[in-house]
């Protein structure tokens, strides 16, 4: 049986083949597959599979890096399409997103950023490995309605807590709603550190942001 386009995307990520990922992403668009489906059911499955193998010691870091790059290559084709498909201009609110100190994982955060933009939010993506001090400075500078903190490493989750504490000390905690996410984080962790919300994927993140902005 020939593999589906989703399986092909998954395999291309597992093989760390960036060029193939780009080609297949274009092919999926030609086949009128919704770009978010190609990401979720294809690229993300591949990257998850490599991550699982990495944690069991079955693949090396170089394979993890190649899988991450391949996923990003596919996303470079698909994310602009998500934005373009919802070109309607309306600003529902301002959301600032960043990955916390010591953590360079960007893929999940960037998907959240794109979906929020597509839904009509103004998004300020301040990147990865952002120190807690910079988060506070940027909140002062841009006054976002929502601040989203991404963390993919258990070792960097405490930085989410630190940002919230520093916002509190700076008298900004009541001025911005803080949401958190990233694979190792949970709703319980969000409660524990005093975050205003948690979401496990980009679609729920959009729902959460809408809810929080609506409740302002
Ligand atoms: C790709 C990847 C990398 C790439 C990152 C490339 C990039 N530019 O992002 C590279 C190779 C650089 C990398 C490096 C490392 N990685 Co890595 N990596 C991964 C991998 C395979 C996939 C992550 C990913 O992109 N997933 C796909 C996206 C779509 O999912 P997501 O990130 O979870 O995001 C979704 C949700 O979580 C949520 N979300 C995400 N952020 C936010 C934010 C908010 C506000 C909200 C509401 C929601 C939200 O929505 C997103 C979309 O649906 C994971 C394995 C895994 N299963 O997660 C390991 C993993 C995260 N890495 C791991 C490790 C250990 C490392 C390294 C330490 C390896 C090393 N020895 O050097 C380094 C760390 C470097 C650093 N200082 O950060 C471990 C972490 C273990 C742990 N619990 O601490 C994992 C789990 C692999 C494993 N099983 O061991 N990694």
Image: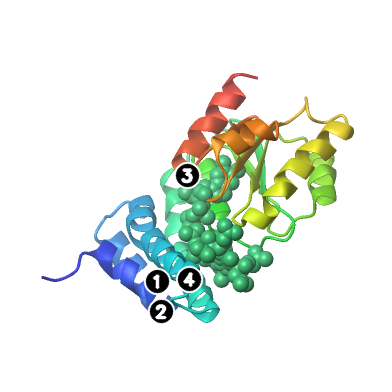
Q: Is residue 192 left or right of residue 78?
A: right
In the image, the residue with mark 4 has its CB under 8 Å from the nearest atom of ligand 1: yes
The tag on residue 54 is 4
The tag on residue 201 is 3
Q: CA distance from mark 1 to mark 4?
A: 14 Å
Q: Secondary structure at mark 2?
A: loop
Residue 166: % across, % down:
84, 39
Residue 194: % across, % down:
70, 31
Q: Is the residue marked by circle 4 packed among few (<14), some (14-19), or many (20+) residues within 10 Å?
A: some
Residue 24: % across, % down:
32, 70
Q: Secondary structure at mark 1?
A: helix
Q: CA distance from mark 1 to mark 3?
A: 20 Å
* Residue topped by disc 2: 17
Image quadrant holding the C terminus, namely top right
Q: State whether residue 41 is above or below residue 54.
A: above
Q: Secondary structure at mark 3?
A: loop
In primary-sequence order, the first of circles 3 and 4 is 4
* Residue topped by disc 1: 13
Q: State whether residue 12 is above or below residue 148.
A: below
Q: Residue furthest top?
A: 215
């Amino acid at each position: 049986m020939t593999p589906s386009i989703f399986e092909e995307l998954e395999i291309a990520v597992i093989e760390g083949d960036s060029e193939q990922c780009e080609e297949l992403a274009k092919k999926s668009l030609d086949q009128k597959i919704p770009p978010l489906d190609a990401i979720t059911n294809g690229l993300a499955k591949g990257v998850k599979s490599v991550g699982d193998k990495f944690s069991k010691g079955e693949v090396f870091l170089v394979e993890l890096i190649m899988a991450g790059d391949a996923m990003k290559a596919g996303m470079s084709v698909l994310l602009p399409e998500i934005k373009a498909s919802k070109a309607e201009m309306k600003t529902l609110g301002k959301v600032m997103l960043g990955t916390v100190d010591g953590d360079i994982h960007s893929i999940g955060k960037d998907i959240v950023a794109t979906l929020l933009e597509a839904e009509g939010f103004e998004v300020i993506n301040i990147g990865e490995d952002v120190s807690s001090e910079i988060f506070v400075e940027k909140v002062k500078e841009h006054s976002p309605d929502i601040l989203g903190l991404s963390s993919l490493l258990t070792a960097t989750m405490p930085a989410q807590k630190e940002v919230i504490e520093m916002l509190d000390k700076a008298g900004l905690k009541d001025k911005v709603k803080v949401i958190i996410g990233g694979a190792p984080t949970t709703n319980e962790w969000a409660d524990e550190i005093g975050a205003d919300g948690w979401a496990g994927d980009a679609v729920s993140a959009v729902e959460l942001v809408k809810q929080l902005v609506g409740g302002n």
